[in-house]
Amino acid sequence: MNHPTIRFVRRSAIHTLENIAPDRTLLDLLREDLACTGTKEGCGEGDCGACTVVLGAIEGDDVRYRAVNSCIRLAHSIDGMALWTVQDIAGDDGSLHPAQAAMLQCHGSQCGFCTPGFVMSLFGIYQNHVVQGRPVTRALAQQELSGNLCRCTGYRPILDAAQAMAACPGAPADTPALRGLLRQLQTTPAGQAGDSASAASYIAPTRLDTLLRARAANPKAQVVAGCTDVGLWVNKQHRRFDAVLDITRVAQLRRVERYPHHVAIGAAVSLTDAYAALVQDRPQLQVFANRFAGLPVRNSGTLGGNVANGSPIGDSMPLLIALGAHIVLMSTRGHREMPLEALYTGYRTHVMAADELLAWIKIPLPVDGAFMRVYKISKRFDDDISAVCLAVNLQVQEGVVVAASIGVGGVAATPARARRAEAVLTGQPWSAERAGQAANALRAEFQPISDMRASAAYRSQVLGNLMHRYWLESQGTPAINLESFALQGDAA
């Protein structure tokens, strides 16, 4: 079977690759087809960052640079984009890029296996911050390197390197020339199954109506919207797909739209941009947003994909449930809307019909008197999966809880709404005693399991303890936790 063509920009030239299988990962394409072995394979799960590359795409009138994990990124997803690997950023004369030179000067490499991934994340920082004249603080470097793990250096010299890049001889990408090449790719399609094709092994429409028709015609195609979970299925479960339906090129679904009473986030909006929209209205969510995986995962993954996948340990859903989010499902037959928690029927099962797609997530804007907090409990602060996630959103007026919305993850087969705990709180005075009753209700409402991340007893205990923490924070008690910990030199 012949597969579609991929075209992308690399080293200031357009490259064309033909007959690429729909489930081939970008990492396999680089290492096995293009002999780009500088990009390393580490975990194969998007956790370690050794395989990090940078993608460039036109967004609006400019080019946006994003570091991503190539191990869980499908090769076809880079069609029409620009690609940089660690083998592409040095000068033609062999001169080192500032990301490479800074790592060398600051002794940021020991065994060296993770170094290519760190260098590419640094390249992303360089393009998005240094080239734009924005300083790289210690805190910024820590946030943007959160998706790269190192077993040797202790990170200090790598963070030093992030801050040292600005002092190295400049080497910005030629953005105007790149923009021209990317627009050339947009105006001369490569022949993938886009809006003019009815069936193929990799279907990537750019219009919503075409996407819905493609879904109806290909109900067994694997839908991808970032692929951070599907990539795991390919790498770890060795699953193969005859057809893939990629929603991320549909312009309508890549928008964040603001209305008087809610924000609508399209299913193809990246987690990076989706959380930025949430933080705009609720700044207290910034730390939680930074802790959702590492930056490369957030740059590839989508909020819609996270919700549609429905993992019981996915962090987005407890937050969205607590915020009162609704989802919009669409098909050629029309659309329907429901509360997010109504989507799930069991472990990774949902109410979507075979011809339906999740298209929009609608989040109400904050209301007066609301106090919102979300807590993520994991073994590692950065780049880790939750053992327990609790999101609490109470509206208190004159000392009485007039509305309560609580989302929970990691304690049931699906992301869940804690209705019993909500009932304990609603219409009652907000007090330490009432918070304790809500904590007991939380523990009684769910029967978590024991697994590699935590025991059932630990999860139950922590779930109630987090409600006590929420009470203390609602009374102005300063938080004493890793979120308030500041690295020495953060202000530098």
Image (cartoon, rainbow, N blue to C red):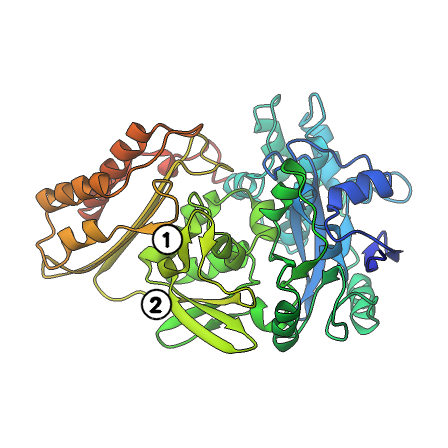
**Whether residue 360 is visible:** yes
Q: Name the residue under label 1.
A: 319
Q: Which residue is drawn at 31% across and 56% down?
A: 322
Q: How crowded is mark 2: few (under 14 residues within 10 Å), some or many (20 or more)?
A: some
- Vertical side of 175 occupied by 162: above or below: above
With 84 as the anchor, is 371 left or right in this view?
left
Question: For the N terminus, which image quadrant?
Answer: bottom right
Residue sitting at the far right? 93
Q: Mark 2 points at which residue?
A: 365
Q: Which residue is drawn at 84% across and 72% down?
A: 188
**Whether residue 228 is visible:** no
Q: Residues within 10 Å of mark 1 (few under 14, many from 20)?
A: many
Q: Residue at x 27, y 34 (%)?
A: 460
With 415 as the anchor, is 294 left or right in this view?
right
Quarter occupied by residue 378: top left
Tell me the CA gap for discs 2 and 1: 14 Å
Looking at the rendered structure, the kind of residue marked 1 is Leu
Q: Is mark 2 on a helix, strand or loop?
A: loop
Quarter occupied by residue 65: bottom right
Is residue 313 or residue 63 the one in the foreground? Answer: 313
- Circles 2 and 1, Cβ within 8 Å, touching? The answer is no
